[in-house]
Image (cartoon, grey):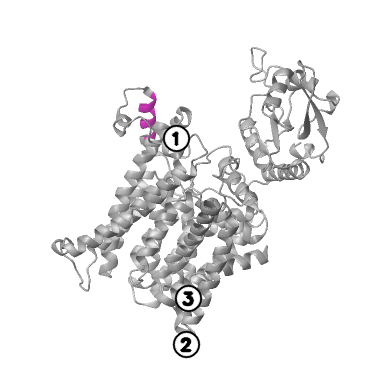
Amino acid sequence: MIFSAVLIFIILSVQPAFFTSRFRQRFEFGMPVCLCLDVFLLLLAGMLFHNLIIGLVLICVFSAASLALAVFFERKNLRSFFSEYLSPGFWAFLVLYALVWIVCAGRIINLWDEFMHWGPMVKQTYLTNRLFTDEGIQIIVHKDYTPAPTLLQYMFLKFSGQYSEGIAIAANSLSAVIFLLPVAGIFKKSEKLKGILAVTAVWLSLSLVIGISSFFNLYVDLVIGVFLGCAVLLILFNRDSKLRFFNVIAICVFIALYKGTGILFSLIAMGLYVLVELLEPKNKPRMTIQEALKPKKLIRAVISAVVFMLPVIVFVFWMKYGTRYVSFTMSEVGAGKQTILSWFTLNSTDTKLQIFLNFIKFCLSEDVSYSFWEISTVSFVAVSVTILAVFCFIEKDSAIKRRLIITTALLTAGFFAYTLSLLFVYYKGLESSSLALSSLPRYQDSYLTVFVILGFTFLLRFTSRAVVNKKAVRRGAAAAVIVLLVMLMPPNIFTLLFMPYEKVVSNRINMRGREIGTEVVQRIAGEHTRAYIAISEWDTTDKRIVDQVTHNASNESAYRVTAYNLIPIEVNSIPHKLGIEFPQNKITDFHNSREWGDYLLDQEYEYVFLYSITEYFLDTYHYMFECALEDILPTTLYRVVRTENPELPVMLQNVPIADYRYDLTIY
């Protein structure tokens, strides 16, 4: 684990060296873009050669070439080079990199979406060295998702030499750290300690919005907001770099490839850059409207806008390329035969009106999720805008003041545009999840993250030196900020940071599920192996039995966890209602052994993994098992054997595996 961490740190940290050498770009401004380039290299290798190993080789070449060229160009000027390269951002990255690896050691995935799609995507990509969208790669749902997060985690896993969920989680967490490094750019190159504390403080302050635990899973809602915050910081503070234009474009493309909602985030960043470019004076303290509208200025802004269509082009191309082998795609969300006008016509069904009312009520009254403060989303935005307006008023640097005013106005407008787009998505979603506004807190927190990053960055900027001159006062203000951060942290922050598992009981059971899955895979997995996961309904009156993920009886969650654990074995795409008794004294899907056996043969299943059983399941299907009734047990594996009996087309032969079944129950 330590060797893996050191190796990955070296590969990543040397990449900005060339940009520092040739363009005098500080480490904190170059590192986020280099991470984007790594993912782009993997994506190109996957699309052109269908082999991600080639992308890993290109990343190593990129790192080695960057270091070699930097040494060559700076061989006579190493002191100046290292002053730029070993900037506050480098030391902040070193400290937080070590912290994240320590925190993520031994962690496992434990959330619904992690088992449904994020986990299967990265596990299949790791095992096959191909994009999960390629033909033949089994992803049960959301195969049309954008690939950047999975490729980022794949890179960390491959360079570490092992498949570890803790390393995949560390990759997700470190992406947030890397894209927060521009916070250190507000300090001088010699103020290394301030840079470390500033990045750490902003990293911790995000728990005010979404909770520190959101850093330590495979969800991307936190990090995509951090990416937008990084683009904004580059536009605000990286004004002297000749690479600023390239940096912002690369990050915008990266955001567009990270999640479906990322395309709107990239449009906001692109619009901000174009506005700043249009209104930025050249060698003048101020610029009038007439000067801003001069032909040369307009032409430059138009060219920037055209170039910044690249993220949109890349996103559209990916949706065409990446969804070749799926029937439903993200592009259908918010699209289809209905026009935008029809979204506003609420008289077609009462459901739309109820979704609209629930949405408005949530934004106006529901507290920001996981926030220490009891404050609604709209109120949070209003407070954030007010704070940024105060910073605009007291900012002394005229260029940054002008940029901050533009940024505040655009981010406020962007919030309402983003919120409206979420409402459209709920209009097009499933009725049950749309009425419940499923995942809305996480979606909105993505955007609120940007306000938190900006607010705390400028707070640290002013407490460090901008407002007062006396050292004692400045140090007192800085101490007050630290105390404020500690006071505002949720009470369980240190538990979440330093305990390897957030839910000890469920994770212990979860780990047993991994051991079972590993043994089954080692015993039977081969090319195109197919296994049917048989799950009967838990007896909800039996309090001893605890589900692998939640403490509720849930066929769906048990199926998702088991399907993930059995990768790369191909399993049934849906959990049938198998052996469930209804008031009509019937079971659904397969009413008897003949129906289930015919289905297993028709779908060419070779094995049945019996996750759970009920008395009703035994009464209905025990004829199919070669073993005695009392030997039909949960968490056991059976081989499907064809028979000549039309009434009993298959027999299920026991395939011995280790006895884990008692470890999946709590007494």
Mark 3 lies on residue: 85
Task: Give the secondary structure at mark 2.
Answer: loop
Residue 187: x and y in percent read: 40, 72
Earlier sequence position, callout 3 versus callout 1: 3
Disc 2 crowd, CA 10 A, few/some/many (<14, 14-19, 20+): few
- Is residue 290 positioned above or below 261 on the image? below
Marked residue nearer the N-terminal end (3 or 2):
2
Q: Which amino acid is tagged 2?
A: Lys
- Residue beneath the point at 43% across and 53% down: 255
Mark 3 or 2: in front is 2
Query: How far, Cα to Cα, is label 2 from label 1?
Result: 61 Å
| Dominant secondary structure of the residues highlighted in magenta in the image | helix
Categorize mark 1 by other alpha carbons within 10 Å: few (<14), some (14-19), many (20+). Answer: some
Question: Residue at the location (62% across, 68% down)?
Answer: 6
Give the alpha-carbon distance from disc 3 to disc 1, as whole Å.
46 Å
Viewer-proximal residue, 530 or 161? 530
The answer to which of 47 and 248 lies nearer the viewer is 47
Q: Badge 2 is on which residue?
A: 76
Q: Nearer the viewer, mark 2 or mark 1?
A: 2
Answer whether labels 3 and 2 touch (C-beta < 8 Å).
Answer: no
The amino acid at mark 1 is Leu
Q: Which residue is mark 1?
A: 437
Quadrant where the C terminus sits is top right
Q: Position of residue 13 (x, y in %)?
A: 53, 69
Which residues are drawn in magenta?
351-359
Q: Secondary structure at mark 3?
A: helix
Q: Can you name the residue that lies furthest to the front here? A: 49
